[in-house]
């Protein structure tokens, strides 16, 4: 168990490793439906979230669907 | 029936979900519009605010979701946005919009065509927001778009069918559905578009910013239905001079 620093949507975040993308989404209380994640600018498909782990200094962008025309 | 990418839809009114005062009014308006296809946008999750309720409300309605690429300033960003929305929803529908200019939000034709070609090859059902340019619309059709979405006027302007003569040419030439997107401010304008033979219209601002969005959604639904019915019935020809609709017998004159 080591603490790592990641960047989530341009905000620094300290988390305890190992942590997967699924665990990160649960930690941030974000619905899985309608959410997409890019890790270090590459899109990670939902089926890979449970096995994709964060490393120190990773950049994570979390996107969701909102109202729009 | 409206057919897009081999899917059929009963409604010819697509609704956008922006600018409503809350998700409940939006949901009630979409239900009143009887829309089968509804647009959404994609953005980074804000850490401070609560989660947007739009998607949850639309899931309850069971409509087809049409995420857009709004915010993309070039083809590369639009393709990335489309791929994100595919991961988010698992659906190939995408409303392609690339408008780098913030003042008029006019679509960039070159970047739109580039992105449309890439996305169609990847298997997306691409519905591009574009200028009312008949040549561009044919090019978008050639690269495999499921429909074209030419503008009537700038987004959110409520100016109506400023591009009407060009929309008429697009309708005449297109082999894929034509959906008038942007600028429609009144039900009468939606009806006029449908009478011209466009396949569908997309309305957002005119419904969302009405004093009573639910009642306005109903008004748009009936206008679109009436306009389509008139088109299918075949409008009579127009003439520059009078054409008598009663017999011109001189009955006031004494019989011979």
Image: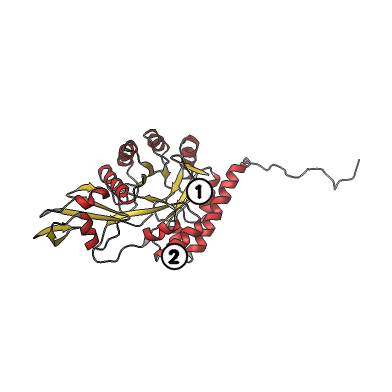
**Residue B186 image offset from top left, x and y in percent:** 50, 56
Residue at point 73%, 44% (across, down)? B245
Q: Chain of mark 2?
A: B
- Seen in the image, is B49 located left or right of residue B93? left
| Distance Cα–Cα, label 1 vs label 2 | 21 Å
- Residue B25 has which mark? 2
> Does the image show residue B246?
yes
**Residue most extreme to the left:** A2
The image shows a total of numbered marks equal to 2
Q: What label does residue B12 carry, if any?
A: 1
> With respect to residue B42, does B255 lie above or below?
above
Q: Is residue B92 left or right of residue B220?
A: left
Label 2, residues with CA under 10 Å away: few <14, some 14-19, many ≥20? some
Front residue of B66/A47: it is A47
Mark 1 residue element: loop
Q: Visible in this render: residue B198? A: no
Task: Write the residue at 52% across / 63% down.
Answer: B215
Q: Is residue B12 above or below residue B5?
A: below
Q: Residue at x 51, y 59 (%)?
A: B32
Percent x, y of residue B219: 54, 58
Q: Position of residue B237 (x, y in %)?
A: 62, 40
Q: Nearer the viewer, residue B143 or B171?
A: B143
- Give SS at disc 2: helix
Quadrant of residue A7 in the image? bottom left
Residue B81 has which mark? none
Residue at the top extreme?
A: B142
Q: Give coordinates of residue B133: x percent, y percent.
A: 41, 40
Give the crowd class for mark 1: few <14, some 14-19, many >=20 residues within 10 Å: many
Q: Chain of mark 1?
A: B
């Amino acid at each position: 168990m080591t603490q790592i620093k990641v960047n989530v949507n341009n905000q620094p975040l300290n988390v305890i490793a190992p942590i997967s993308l699924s665990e990160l989404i649960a930690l941030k209380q974000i619905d899985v439906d309608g959410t997409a994640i890019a890790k270090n600018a590459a899109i990670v498909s939902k089926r890979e979230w449970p096995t994709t782990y964060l490393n120190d200094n990773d950049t994570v962008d979390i996107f969701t669907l909102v109202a729009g025309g | 029936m409206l057919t897009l990418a081999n899917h059929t839809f009963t409604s010819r009114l697509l609704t956008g979900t922006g600018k409503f005062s809350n998700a409940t009014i939006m949901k009630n308006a979409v239900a009143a519009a009887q829309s089968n296809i509804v647009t959404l946008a994609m953005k980074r999750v804000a850490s401070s605010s609560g989660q947007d309720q739009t998607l949850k409300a639309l899931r309850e309605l069971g409509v087809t979701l049409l995420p857009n690429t709004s915010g993309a300033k070039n083809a590369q960003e639009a393709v990335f946005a489309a791929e994100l929305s595919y991961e988010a929803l698992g659906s190939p529908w995408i409303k392609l919009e690339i408008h780098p200019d913030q003042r008029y939000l006019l679509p960039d034709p070159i970047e739109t065509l580039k992105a449309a070609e890439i996305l169609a090859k990847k298997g997306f059902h691409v519905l591009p927001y574009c200028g009312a340019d008949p040549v561009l619309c044919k090019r978008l059709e050639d690269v495999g778009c499921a429909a074209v979405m030419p503008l009537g006027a700038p987004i959110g302007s409520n100016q109506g069918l400023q591009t009407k003569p060009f929309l008429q040419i697009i309708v005449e030439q297109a082999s894929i559905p034509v959906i008038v997107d942007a600028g429609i401010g009144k039900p009468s304008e939606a009806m006029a578009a449908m009478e011209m033979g466009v396949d569908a219209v997309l309305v957002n601002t005119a419904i969302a910013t009405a004093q009573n969005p639910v009642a306005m959604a109903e008004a748009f639904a009936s206008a679109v239905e009436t306009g389509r019915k008139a088109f299918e019935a075949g409008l009579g020809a127009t003439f520059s001079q009078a054409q008598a609709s009663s017999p011109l017998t001189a009955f006031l004159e004494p019989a011979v």
